[in-house]
Image (spheres, rainbow, N blue to C red):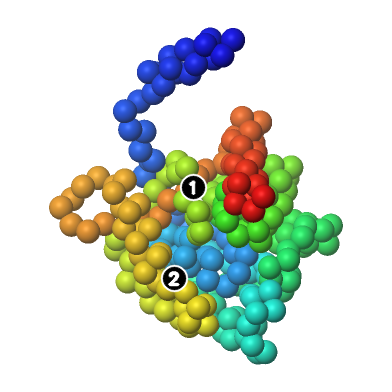
Amino acid sequence: MKKFINNWRQAGIAQLRPCPLPKPLTLINHGKVLVFAPHPDDETLGCGATLALLRQNNCAVKIVFVTDGGGAGSLPEGSIAIRQQEAIAALTTLGIQEWLFLNEPDGSFRNHPQFEQQVLEIMQQFQPDWLFLPSVLDYHRDHVAIGQSIFNLWQLHKTAKRLFFYEIWSPVPATHVVDISSVISLKQQAINHYQLPLAHCDYLSASMGLSRYRGLYLPSQGHAQYAEAFIEAENNKHLGGIITSMLNMRFRLEKLLFD
């Protein structure tokens, strides 16, 4: 049986294409885009430049910050207000004028019926064409819990035509990339507004490095290119299985690292 499985895998590998690169994502015009960010700065790090391009395409973009950004109690008093002010400054730089703070606890988010009802009302009122969520493969527990909770709601209620997971702490197995070279300076400026988290970690260099790496997936044009990467979810059982596999991989990482 073991030999059969190994031969089956080898045959499958032989059928793989040499390098299945993510597809360029064609951005919509005059659409409605809803983004859920676990903490202030996640939206900018994960998909800020794509959102800037969508705004340039005359899309209505709304950001929902799920937690209060208080750093699970590790930040000094008054940090929540500072992080919200930084978020507003970053969004303004990206050309975004609509946002909402839900003020769930940072670092200990747990899904609950009131949260689901609130999210469902937001989605039904805004009626987005596209929905952006944090990846369920991410290393941060809040990101995983929030991405999974809202993904489940989307599957049940079909509240947007397309859903994309964005990457922050862990790269996604990307299906699409967006060329952000023309707005990379806007993303840098927006990240720089988040001085409180930047004091603890060099998110700017990390984000620029990841965007530069993702730029390798773009057609070469002889100059430095930057991209943001996403995995698109489809509202069917097959894709639900892929998301479940990503979540199971996250559980395995937890077990390997901490057991």
Q: In which quarter of the image is residue 212?
A: bottom left
Residue 141 at x, y = what percent?
A: 65, 58
Viewer-nearest residue: 125 or 90: 90
Q: Name the residue under label 2.
A: 203
Q: In the rendered view, does 243 fall on the left or right side of 219?
A: right
Residue at horizontal 39 percent and vertical 41 percent from the top: 22
Element under disc 2: helix
Question: As displayed, is residue 54 above or below residue 176?
Answer: below
- Residue 228 sits in quarter: bottom left
**Mark 1 vs 2, N-terminal side:** 1
In the displayed structure, does residue 118 sit left or right of residue 141?
A: right
In this view, 128 is above or below 196: above
- State the residue lying farthest toward the front: 259
What residue sits right under mark 1 in the picture?
A: 172
**Along the line of sight, which residue is nearer the eye, 146 or 203?**
203
How many neighbours does mark 2 have within 10 angstroms: few (below 14), some (14-19), or many (20 or more)? Answer: some
Residue 78 position, x and y percent, is 65, 89
